[in-house]
Image (spheres, coloured by chain):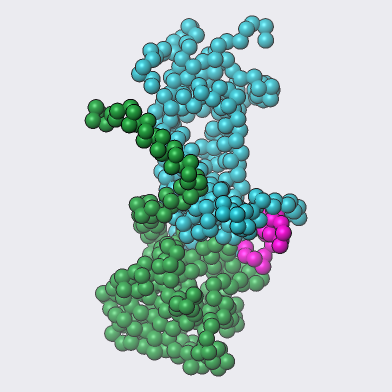
Chain colours: A cyan, B green
Amino acid sequence: MAEAETPVAPSEGASPVRVYRHRLPARIWHWVNALTLLVLLMSGLMIFNAHPRLYWGQYGANPDYAWLAVGSTPKTGFLRIGETRIETTGVLGRWTDAKGVEQTWAFPGWATIPTTYSLADGRRWHLLFAWVLAISLTLYMLWSLFGGHLKRDLHVRRAEWSPRHIWHDVKDHAQLRFPKGEAAAHYHILQKLSYIGVIFVLLPLMIATGLTMSPGMNASTPWLLDLFGGRQSARSIHFIVAWLLVAFFLVHIAMVLLAGPVNEVRSMITGWFRLPPERKAGR
Amino acid sequence: MSGLILPRRRLIARAGGLVAAAGTLPLLSGCDAINEAPAVRKILSMGEEMNRASQRALMDRDALAREFTRADLSPTFRSNGTKLPPGAAYAAHAAGGFADWRVEVTGLVARPLSLSMADIRAMPQRTQITRHDCVEGWSAIGQWTGPQLSHVLAAAGVRDSARYIVFRCADRIGGDLYYESCDMVDALHPQTIMAWALNDAVLPIANGAPLRLRIERQLGYKHAKYLTDIQAVASLDAIGAGKGGYWEDRIDYEWYAGI
């Protein structure tokens, strides 16, 4: 696609119409990671279905108090968090499958891999794609660090840390006012913070808490158990962080849609981003 | 390159066929078809091999699973799988306090053994408070007592040609006797014991009375309950369907359950 058009290199002074915003490694990682996280989420929900209860501490099983549980009554499905019970009939705990049969697994078939209950298969998908996540994330981190991506695109400059600057960006977002012209070629502060949060906090947390659930890793790397306060705490954190990643995904998609989905998706495929025209003076 | 270019009309016809096929099949069953495809199964099983190889490489051969204190014990130790083996034979053993229970040690050993529960309790004992992790996701902490499997294997004179130890059980699930296996690293691991006591009491029936295996660096389904036979073998090919365990053969659980 890109070869067919005449690329316009970003130049100082002149306001470029198109900029090369995403380099090839970033684009490859983005799409590999998108697919990987989807498989990990859906196979993870299947694994959760095998025991839809979460605990804090070293141990936790049916006789112990679960801080979160999905369950069913003869007529309804429910989600309980602490002492708060929410009826979730049709979605969680009691739902109807594609064949019209009522099921009482926690997450419904459309949300899991595979669609019908198989802990064994859910684990096979999850534990293979966990490798894809870990390897691709490591490579991407190294490329970001040594390839200049981190310093050039994600590094938060001193001026950007000022509360006024952050508040300004929050207000702009709340009013759905996105950067135009040259400013749109760079990540703004909220974008930088969320990308840094996903790449350097949430995804590593997913991998570390996942490994903490492994009895083999507990023998070779026992400090992981102390770091997260036990295997069942690690399992709870794993689940919470998975939903934080889903929350990131939803905001990410909303921003892409609002900022111009064709231009945004194209730039993540070809690398080239069309700068939105400058606003009229006197905004 | 030019060899790859199809006439546009054929391409459109093909794409149309694909769309039609996708339309008639619900999307979800399409996903499940991927899950069932033999080539995909092969790729998926690579994960198990990567996990086994990397954990074996990272882990010291005798690295211990964490041992806890009495203060960490689960108030109630949950049971799973078979809670009462069906059949008159087991019922008779239970009624007699398992006085006539025997564990046969056979296969690639110099001296096949037939051990009574009294023999097993007379061996040097190990007591350990460890966490039991079910493949489903729950954990329970319990205190286990019994002889090390390595002691039993040494007494039987296990041969160098033995590469795996197979465990056979008295409980039937869906008509078939349960069985499991492990390699020699786990078989000779200091925490791999044949437990006859849980939390200072004789092992309850729901937890595998009179004797169950503890393989502390792997998930619960490896910890064979109602143990009757310990067999040293050179290969798992002739055991069940060849994957080394009851659930491995039936629903494709991983044989290496360290994660």
Q: Is residue B13 left or right of residue A13?
A: left
Total labels: the figure holds 0
Q: Residue at x 69, y 55 (%)?
A: A77
Q: Is residue A163 visible?
A: no
Viewer-proximal residue among A216 and B248: B248
Tell me what residue is drawn at x 41 percent, y 77 percent: B167
Quadrant position of the N terminus of chain B in the picture: top left
Position of B121 with respect to A58 (left or right) is: left
- Residue A227: give x, y in percent of width and height: 56, 52
Q: Which residues are magenta?
A: A60-79
Residue at (35% x, 18% y) in the render: A3
Residue at image x 48%, y 69%? B221
Relative vertical location of residue A119 with respect to residue B108 in this rendering, above or below:
above
In the displayed structure, would residue B120 be above or below residue A72? Answer: below
Residue A138 percent location from the top left of the image: 43, 40
**Is residue A179 part of the magenta span, yes or no?**
no
Residue A204, image x, y percentages = 51, 44
Residue A78 is a magenta residue: yes
Residue A69 in the image, given as x and y percentages of width and height? 67, 57
Magenta: main secondary structure equals loop
Residue B237 lies in quadrant: bottom left
As displayed, is residue B15 above or below residue A116?
above
Q: Is residue B222 visible?
A: yes
* Residue nearer the viewer, A272 or B220: A272
Q: Is residue A83 left or right of residue A163?
A: right
Q: Nearer the viewer, residue A112 or A211?
A: A112
Quarter of image, res B181: bottom left
